[in-house]
Amino acid sequence: MHEPAAAQTSGPPTGRLSCTVGAGFAAIAKSQKPLDCRFRPRRGPVQYYTGIVRQYGVDLGSIRGTRMAWHVYGPYARAPLGALSGSYTAPAPAATGAGSALVGGEGNKVTLQPRVAQTVRGFNAAVGVTQFELTLAGSGGRRR
C-alpha cells in the first residue's frame, strides 16, 4: 500500500469543505458514518458531496448533528466540478501528529486541513477523522 503524497498547502486555501455527520454518530472507532458535504471554492459555484467516514483517530463520543470543516488546498485556481471526489487518508501519524491534514481526491492532489474553529459543541470533529470518501452529489441543486 502506498502512502499519499501531500498536496501543496502554501498560499491561501482554494476553498472550504463543511460536512455534517449523519445520525447515529457514535463512539465506536471502527464504525462508518454518512456525510453530507458542501464545498465552497474561492472561485466557482458551490459543489455538494456525499460521503462515508471510514475511520476515526480518536473517540469522539456520542454527538448529534456534528459538523466538520476543512480548508481545501488543491492545484487549481477554479475548482472543477467533482474536484474533491475520492478517498482521503491522514498521512503517517509519526510524521504529522494529531489533527493533521487529510490527503486525497483524484491523484492525491487535494489536501484538507482541519479549520481551527469552535462549534456549538465546543470543537471541530474533523480533527478526529483519519479516513473518508467523497462522491459528487447528483445535480439538481442543494441536497437535504
Image (cartoon, rainbow, N blue to C red):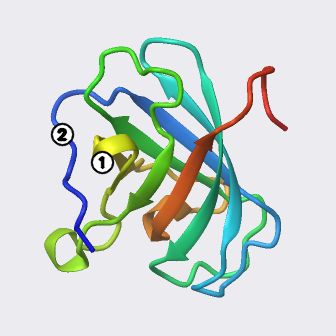
- The type of residue carrying mark 2 is Gln
Task: Between residue 106 and residue 71, name the one nearer to us.
Answer: 106
Mark 1 and mark 2 lie on one chain; the one further toward the N terminus is 2
Which residue is located at x 35 percent, y 66 percent? 99
Which quarter of the figure has residue 52?
bottom right
- The residue carrying pointer 1 sits among few (fewer than 14), some (14 to 19) or many (20 or more) residues within 10 Å by Cα, namely many
CA separation in Å, label 1 and label 2:
10 Å
Vertical relation: 30 (above or below) 42: below
Residue at the (54%, 56%) spot, across then down = 133
Which of 102 and 16 lies nearest the eye of the viewer? 102
Please state if 125 lies on the left or on the right of 21 as rendered.
Answer: left
- Say which quadrant the C terminus sits in: top right
Q: How many marks?
A: 2
Q: Is residue 131 above or below residue 73?
A: below
Q: Which residue is mark 1?
A: 108
| Residue 17: mark | none
Q: Can residue 123 be seen at all in this image of the molecule?
A: no
Q: Amino acid at mark 1?
A: Asn
Report the residue at 38% width, 37% height from top.
Answer: 72
Q: Left of 13 or right of it: where is 11? A: left
Residue 26 seen in the current view: yes
Where does the image place residue 16, in percent across and percent down from the top left?
Answer: 47, 34
Question: Mark 1 near mark 2, Cβ–Cβ under 8 Å?
Answer: no
User: Is 142 situated left or right of 110 in this image?
Assistant: right
Front of the two marks 1 and 2: 1
Residue density around tag 2, few if under 14, some if 14–19, many if 20 or more, within 10 Å: few
* Vertical placement of residue 53 versus 111, above or below: below
Q: Position of residue 122 (x, y in %)?
A: 58, 62
From the viewer's perspective, tell me whether residue 105 is left or right of residue 33: left
Callout 2 secondary element = loop
Looking at the image, which residue is at 23% across and 74% down?
92
Give the labeled residue for mark 2: 8
